[in-house]
Amino acid sequence: MDISVVFQIAAVGILVAVLNLVLQRAGREEQAMMTTLAGLLVVLFWVIQYISELFESVQAVFNL
């Protein structure tokens, strides 16, 4: 795992937070919520790949 992944997740978080604030100030709460959910899904897809690699490594170590 590379440290750049952490920075990418942080960048997505900052971008989503700014978009959320702007949309809420504009009175578009529904779009703000959808933006937040979209950002969460993007990060979850990234993290799921690393969790899968972790489980594969654990299986290889313990010969399961």
Image (cartoon, helix red, strand yellow):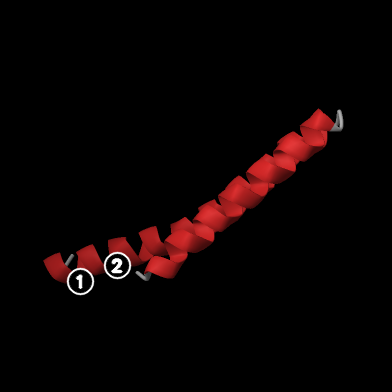
To which residue does mark 2 refer? 56
Compared with 15, 20 (above or below) is above
- Identify which residue is drawn at 37% across, 71% down: 2
- Identify which residue is drawn at 20% across, 71% down: 60
Q: Residues within 10 Å of mark 1 (few under 14, many from 20)?
A: few
Q: Looking at the rendering, in which quadrant would you find the N terminus?
A: bottom left
- Identify which residue is drawn at 13% across, 65% down: 62
To which residue does mark 1 refer? 60
Kindly indicate the quadrant of the structure image that contains residue 57.
bottom left
Q: Is residue 28 left or right of residue 18?
A: right
Q: Position of residue 43 (x, y in %)?
A: 54, 54
- Give the residue type that dot 2 points to: Glu
| Discs 2, 1 touching: Cβ within 8 Å | yes
What SS does tag 2 mark? Answer: helix
Residue nearest the observer in this picture, 29 or 21: 21
Q: Residues within 10 Å of mark 2 (few under 14, many from 20)?
A: few
Q: Is residue 10 left or right of residue 15?
A: left
- Give the residue type that dot 1 points to: Ala
Q: Is residue 37 visible?
A: no
Q: Position of residue 47 (x, y in %)?
A: 45, 57
Residue nearest the observer in this picture, 2 or 14: 14
Q: Is residue 9 left or right of residue 41?
A: left
What SS does tag 1 mark? Answer: helix
Q: Is residue 27 visible?
A: yes
